[in-house]
Image: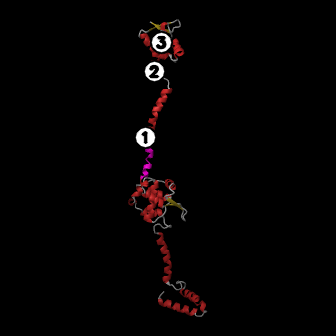
Amino acid sequence: MDSEALKTAFTQAAEIASAVPQALRETAFNRALDALLGGSVAAGGGADSKAGKKKPKHAKTQKQKEPGDADNDPFKYLTEHLDRTAHPEITSAPRVLERALWLLRVSKDAHGIDGLGSTHIAKLLTEKFRLRTTKQAVQQALDSARNYVDRHSPQSGRLVYRIMHGGENYLDSPKAKDAKFGKAAHIVRTPRRAEKTEARKPKHTLRATADRPPTKGSATKRAGAIVGELIGEGFFKKPRTIRSVIDHAKGSLGYHLKANELSPPLLRALRGKKLKRSQNSDGQYEYSET
């Protein structure tokens, strides 16, 4: 609408308003002007006023595009704008806890996004930084570090984690950089277990030696010593069977001998001409002095 038409409309509206009481003239003027202009222009504004109403909507759209706004998608924004090569501290972090804390810190300081959910953290670490992890692993790590992060539920209702001052101090401390040594603890235990096993061996050997019966070789040597002693005492002046030697050693000497233990020393004494043997009426060998 041109200026001449506007002047005519204002003049006519003023004439109409002059016919009403003074208290109602302003309201009458506005209604008359709306009627004359067909509602296309608001009172006191015109085309520029109508255009001005669109500005707040446009401004709101611009605000939604700003990083870190609550209405924006933080995962999509970080996927597009976060440069993983500019943050080697994330890729060099030893565990899921340190990686998640670094990601929360970088998101807040560099991109104005204060808080991420465990799903977004896991996807960013896996897809953006090629550090494979899961939502459950992130939750477990951050839930166990209550002094480092704050659990917050915004209007969306989704739980997000926000790094706190304690978490930033932890990342700046040597403890966070040396956390990788905690992973290798199980490797160190293996030699300690081996040393412990070796330390137990002498005790095991002593116990076995005390509890186990003598070996076949030692039993035979002991039987040989007993046979030699019996020969010297004249035990074999009378013919003796192996059974009689066993009974005499048990009853008089307190030794429990077996026939297979006595056979080798008796055979050596026989070959050494210290004893001779013959069969009795029962077909048993009897040993006696030569």
Q: Nearer the viewer, residue 4 or 229?
A: 229
Image location (x, y in percent) of residue 175: 43, 54
Residue 182 painted magenta: yes
Instruction: Specify the segment rendered in magenta.
Output: 178-194
Residue at 60% across, 90% down: 23
Residue furthest left in the image: 85
- Residue type for callout 2: Ser
Residue 124 visible in the displayed image: no
Q: Which residue was labeled with disc 3?
A: 230
User: In the rendered view, would you say 262 is above or below 141?
Assistant: above
| Mark found first going from the N terminus, 3 or 1 | 1
For mark 2, give the secondary structure: helix
Residue 232 visible in the displayed image: yes
The label number, if any, that marks residue 218 in the structure image: 2
Disc 1 crowd rating (10 Å Cα; few below 14, some 14-19, many 20+) is: few
User: In the rendered view, would you say 205 is above or below 23?
Assistant: above
Q: Is residue 53 left or right of residue 21?
A: left
Q: Which residue was labeled with disc 1?
A: 191
